[in-house]
Image (cartoon, helix red, strand yellow):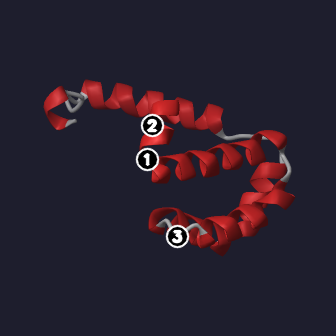
Amino acid sequence: MDALKQGSQTFATLRSFSMRFSGIFHSRKSARLEEWIDDAIRSGLVSLARFARVLRRDVDAVCKRIDMPWSNGQAEGQINRLKTIKRSMYGRAGAELL
């Protein structure tokens, strides 16, 4: 990781922003999200600024997700499992389609 960060300033910046973003979710403190969005927009990285602008469009929902202890991960996992089974039953799970 250190070699990548030393080799690319863009990578180091993106990693820094991703670690901060992850920290916001793990700490469950949505108050820091607005600051993260502002910093991301000013970062000069086009893809990161675009992502931040999309987050800002629905910032209330994102903040609620950060603050709430619930997750739909279990349901999404079950849906993914069922879709995988269905694809395999219809012969559409082959490597050539991936």
Question: What residue sits right under mark 1 in the picture?
Answer: 8
Q: Is residue 52 left or right of residue 79?
A: right
Q: Which residue is pictured at 62% across the width and 65% down the height?
A: 40
Q: Position of residue 29 (x, y in %)?
A: 86, 51
Q: Position of residue 14 (x, y in %)?
A: 54, 51
Which circle's residue, 3 or 1, is located before the other in the chain? 1
Disc 3/disc 1 C-alpha distance (Å) = 15 Å
Q: Is residue 71 left or right of residue 2?
A: right
Residue 36: image quadrant is: bottom right
For badge 2, the amino acid type reads: Leu
Q: Which of the two residues, 13 or 52, is positioned nearer the viewer here?
A: 13
Q: Is residue 72 left or right of residue 10?
A: right
Question: What residue sits right under mark 3 in the picture?
Answer: 44
Residue 55: image quadrant is: bottom right
Q: Which residue is pictured at 67% across the width and 40% down the height?
A: 72
For badge 3, the amino acid type reads: Gly
Q: Report crowding for label 1: few under 14, some 14 to 19, many 20 or more residues within 10 A (C-alpha).
A: few
Q: Position of residue 57 (x, y in %)?
A: 64, 74
Q: Residue furthest left?
A: 96
Q: Are marks 3 and 2 in contact (CB under 8 Å)?
A: no
Q: Are marks 2 and 1 in contact (CB under 8 Å)?
A: yes
Question: What residue sits right under mark 2 in the picture?
Answer: 4
Residue 60: image quadrant is: bottom right
